[in-house]
Amino acid sequence: MRAALRLALVAAFTAAVLIGAWLAMRGTGPDRRNLDALVTVGGDLARDATHPILDLTRMSESDEAALGAAIDKEIRASMPVGSDPRLEGYLRRVLQSLAPHVSRGGIPYAIALVRSREVNAFAVPGGRIYVMEGLLDFVKSEAELAAVIGHEISHVDLRHCIERMQAEQKLRRVSPGIAALARLGHELVLRGYAEELELEADRNAARLVARARYDPWEAMSLFARTARMEAPRERAPTRDPWVEIASAIPEALRRYLATHPPADQRMEAVRETLRAEPELWLGERRYVGRVNLARRRAMADEPVEGEWIARSSPPG
């Protein structure tokens, strides 16, 4: 009965967004910002409605790994994955420093390079991590790179990847066969997560990075550069309310599903975590790795003495 009530609320939310969008275009209802808020609430309702089902149908690590391998085939058929043995070897060594510190055993983590100038990375169920080549030019140290990879590992380790996919499967009534699930997983790869899940991944990444002996505070430099690149993008309005309804709702959904939180929120999440858990870094030698990034030689293979830092207080 409780699950049925939640699903009814989701249906009511959908109707409310349609009406709200139409009223917004007429100037008698909520503005675009409030429409976004409606979509956020609706996404939370949908996730809450399906979460009890996910708890009852939790996938084993071995099945999740098999699914990840199937999604990997879909990705390699549609994206320029590999092959640069030197860069992929470098990414693999950074991943191998982080993976021993995850919470869930039994996930065979692997990493691949996508030959794209886009600054991005993503993960799929089963521990498959993909780093776009443009990211390697954007980060300024191996610790920053580790923060990004740790963020993607966290989406797997905290079950964000697999639970999102299972929720989509239930809502769309997708066949549970591995081929259908692999296609669904491929469709979801470049979407973001709900804001609280993204921030949870940032917090967990800070812990992984520190336990792997990287400087977790380097994530702040990464987010600061990201903040300078953030700019609001507004779409020119039209007077046709039905065109606006058709376009406004997908835009709001894309913002909810496909973007990370603002950089200042991500910085605050990491800052709060590290201040609350000073044993991760305070007075401990932690690695930055600017030279390693430039040389594409991981800390694990070629530590540079001048790259170690011991902080007695938070930076800045």
Image (cartoon, helix red, strand yellow):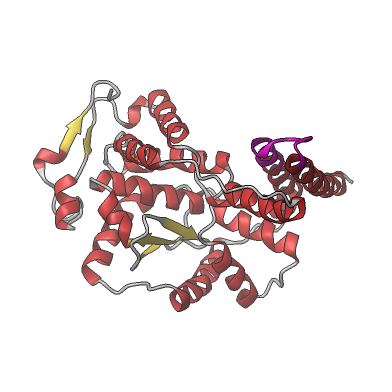
- Residue 224: x, y in percent? 34, 35
- Residue 122: x, y in percent? 45, 57
Residue reaching furthest right? 1
Asked whether 127 or 192 is in front, the reply is 192
Q: How many marks?
A: 0
Q: Relative to 96, is 126 on the left or the right? A: right
Q: Main secondary structure of the magenta part?
A: helix
Residue reaching furthest front? 239
Asked whether 132 or 297 is in front, the reply is 132
For the record, the magenta segment spans 26-38
At x 73% / y 64%, what residue is drawn? Answer: 172
In the picture, residue 234 is in which quadrant?
top right
In the picture, residue 96 is in which quadrant?
bottom left
Measured along the vertical axis of the image, is residue 174 above or below residue 191? below
In the picture, residue 84 is in which quadrant?
bottom left
> Is residue 62 at least partly visible in the picture?
yes
> Is residue 63 at least partly visible in the picture?
no
33 is within the stretch colored magenta: yes
At x 29% / y 59%, what residue is drawn? Answer: 91
142 is within the stretch colored magenta: no
At x 66% / y 59%, what residue is drawn? Answer: 166
- Residue 191: x, y in percent? 54, 56
Asked whether 173 or 278 is in front, the reply is 173
Measured along the vertical axis of the image, is residue 269 above or below residue 143? above
Work out which quarter of the rendered image holds the C terminus and state it: top left
- Residue 39: x, y in percent? 69, 44
